[in-house]
Image: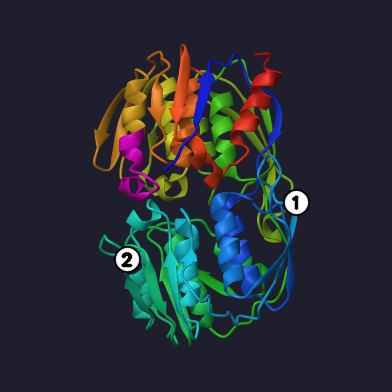
Amino acid sequence: MRSGELRVRRLARISGEIEVPGDKSISHRAAIIAGLSDGPCRISNYLASEDCLNTLRAMERLGVQCDGDVSGDVEGAARELVVHGCGGELEPAGGSIDCGNSGTGMRLLTGVLAAQPFSSILAGDASLSKRPMSRVIRPLAQMGARIEAQGEREGCAPLKIIGTRLQGTRYKLPVASAQVKSAILLAGVFAKGKTTVVQPVATRDHTERMLAKFRVRTVRDGDEISVYGGQRLRAADIEVPGDLSSAAFWIVAAAANPKSKLLVKNVGLNPTRTAILPVLLRMGAKIKDRALTPEDAGEPAGHIVVEGAALRGTGIRPDEVPNLIDEIPVLAVAGALAQGRMVIRQAAELRVKETDRIAAVCENLREMGAEVEEFEDGLEIEGGRRLRGAVLDSYGDHRIAMAFAVAGLFAEGETVITGTDCIATSYPGFEAQLREIRGRAGR
């Protein structure tokens, strides 16, 4: 049961500069891939959120030694972490492994554990136990994996994974998913022969980039990504950039307020993660980004400058949806604050996230006085209505909680979001950063 609440009032402007904690997607992969490497790996700026700490603890349960302070500072960034790779030879956990609320952790670990010479059980909290795991079980089964979904719902966790020798395969993803793609590629590292994933549209490529950093070669040919089994992961150090999905809340808050100017420092600028920026630019936002690291260095990062402006509604294209799946809740808030109509369709994936995000966004926007129409695969928002403060439910979803905290910065009266302990799954320092921003605004 999630508890906690966040109270938000209108903010005159957002100004100054901020840094956001380490990237959640990259932190998950860093813990797993470093743990599979052949030596010690230093990880800087690891995200010390509930989800990422659960993945780190899972690797420790599997025999990987981790040293360093992972308690995190107020912004949720671990100061420094050393993961001692096991050379690809994990150990049985001796009991079920708790993935908490993390779908990323569970799906990626399923790919790794399917190829190990022992059995494992991956479990999660009530929310994760309702999320579909068949999408990762099917391709792994095609490689010879033996996985039993033991949850109350068909195809859901807990997952019993009976490790075995895997055979490379070619699998076409029916739905674009970086998590499923990553699980298959990680299994492919341990499989015999060549494993190929075919994507319907490009998705986040953090796994491919990180494997390359650990000297595992992947080959991309159009919409196909392949890896050959038997490659050894060579130890490497990782600098985790700031999470653009976390920065998105402040970017939208500043972009929609004509009095605002904000500098977001040291944030990831991976091209498969920056889809929110062109959407906001289409809406009339004034945004500039400046890369500070070359793209071939691994994960590009840099600064983003946002100046407030009057926004206008836009449509989100279907090919943009997979790389916007975490930002759509706050983009829906931007749509409510803009003039004109925002259209989000072919986004049914939102219904099987931490909560049904389509239903949650529609319900909360209506509570605040916005005009919104719900569809099975998305929503349409008629922007421009004045928002009013309301008591809103987070539905146990960190991104819903933070998106409507942003909405509260523009609403008349007080907005109260309940069940906000869930924010700690990705951004434990969010409330403290909100107080800091409010303090700079003199309110």
Range drawn in magenta? 347-360
Where's residue 114, x and y in %? 45, 78
Q: Residue 284: within the magenta?
A: no
Q: Nearer the viewer, mark 2 or mark 1?
A: 1
Q: How is the image coloured?
A: rainbow
- Looking at the image, which is closer to me, 206 or 81? 81
**Which numbered disc covers residue 134?**
2
Amino acid at pointer 1: Arg
Where's residue 252, x and y in %? 53, 29
Q: Is residue 217 left or right of residue 310?
A: right
> Residue visible at 59% across and 21% down?
308
> Residue visible at 37% across and 15% down?
385
Q: Identify the residue position indicated by label 1 in the image.
A: 79
Q: Check disc 2: other Cα within 10 Å, few if <14, some if 14-19, many if 20+.
A: some
Quarter containing the N terminus: top left
Q: Is residue 297 left or right of residue 395?
A: right
Q: Residue 352: within the magenta?
A: yes
Q: Secondary structure at mark 1?
A: loop
Amino acid at pointer 2: Ser
The answer to whether any part of residue 431 appears in the image is yes
**Which numbered disc covers residue 279?**
none
